[in-house]
Amino acid sequence: MTTSGFGNTVANSDISIASPRFLASDNTSGICPEAMHYLLQANEQDDLAYGNDVWTERAASRFRTLFETDCEIFFVFNGTAANSLALASLCQSYHGVICHQLAHIETDECGGPEFFSNGSKLLPVDTPMGKLTPEGIARVVTRRNDIHYPRPRVVSITQATEVGTLYSLDELQAIREVADQHDLKIHMDGARFANACASLNVTPAQMTWKAGVDVLCFSGTKNGLAFGEAIVFFDHELARDFEYRCKQAGQLASKMRFVSAPWLGLLENDTWLVNARHANAMAQRLVEGIHDIEGVNVMFPVQANSVFLEVPITAQQYLRDCGWTFYTFIGEGGVRFVCSWNTSEALIDALVTDLRQALVQRDQQ
């Protein structure tokens, strides 16, 4: 008997490989070569601090070209800070933020949005497929209008959603229309924004300001960076004094060039898009591979790089014993696999093989 890295006892005769095989999240992947190239370049000589360096200026310029507009760009370390600070810039403490009940800002950011806004309340909505709807938004806005209840001020959209589904451009436009009716701003949590653009085959501009988005949090961490998110304001007035928010929140990097320079590797030659397309393709390979495995069912449409499967509990344990990592936060029996820029076909095929074997083992018990 041997023990895997996850504390599971594994029978050598049953499982030949029990080393960690990471598909729980795209956060587990390394730095893509293009980003590493610019990180090393930025390290070749000294430069100015606190974002006054040439690398940060170049990266911001590239973002403006990518989004086809004169937007304001700010770089922070992580997604929680990006979302929390962006929302705080759109809200007063007595305002409310309408979001889906599965949204990351509601379930996984430890009250960050409320903390940095000094109390703006999240107003979660339960609508199908992880997506907000105009009707759901309108219900929250019109539910109460008395002074004892937070005034809704912002709609926060996650693209791609927490269950891997996507808002179409028409759906985004419909949300913009209801937002205009009720004087609401729109924030987009783009943790997997690149994957959404790749899947829908639309430009970043079409997905954001042309669809009525006011501010985007664009993740680099999940797309090939070691760390670093870009906050993109499409309304200059909303970005007023935002650099002070970043400083106060401990998000102003003294050596900012090491946060911003790797973005050049993603933006050059559309590496961000190439990485996202690959991750999406690996998710599709997984879905195609398990389509005929009896006892394994797809829980949500696979539209980006996340795959949610219903897998029997005993089969889940077999996979863990094989060294597979995955999350199980979507209902009993539900597991999530997320593909990344460096997920290989061989890794996906190995998972499919182990899923088949897991069901065989279950049936033999």
Image: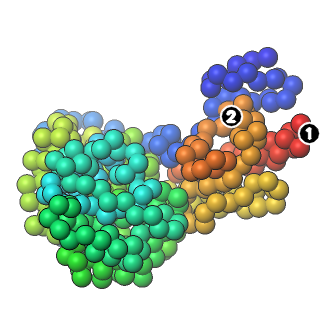
| Image vertical order of residue 140 relative to residue 362, above or below | below
Mark toward the viewer: 1 or 2: 1
The answer to whether residue 248 is left or right of residue 329 is left
- Say the numbered circle drawn on residue 320: 2
Furthest-top residue in this view: 1
- Identified at 21% across, 54% down, the residue is 120
Q: In which quarter of the image is residue 91?
A: bottom left
Of the numbered discs 1 and 2, the one sitting upstream in the chain is: 2
The answer to whether residue 248 is left or right of residue 257 is left
- Identified at 27% across, 36% down, the residue is 43
Q: Counting other residues with Cα less than 10 Å from the Cα at mark 1, is it few (<14), some (14-19), or many (20 or more)?
A: few
Locate residue 256, reporting x and y percent: 21, 41
Does residue 144 show up?
yes
- Disc 2 is placed on an element classified as helix
Classify the position of the N terminus by image quarter. top right
The answer to whether residue 188 is left or right of residue 169 is left
* Front in this rendered view, residue 266 or 284: 284
- What residue does disc 1 label? 364
* Front in this rendered view, residue 352 or 345: 352
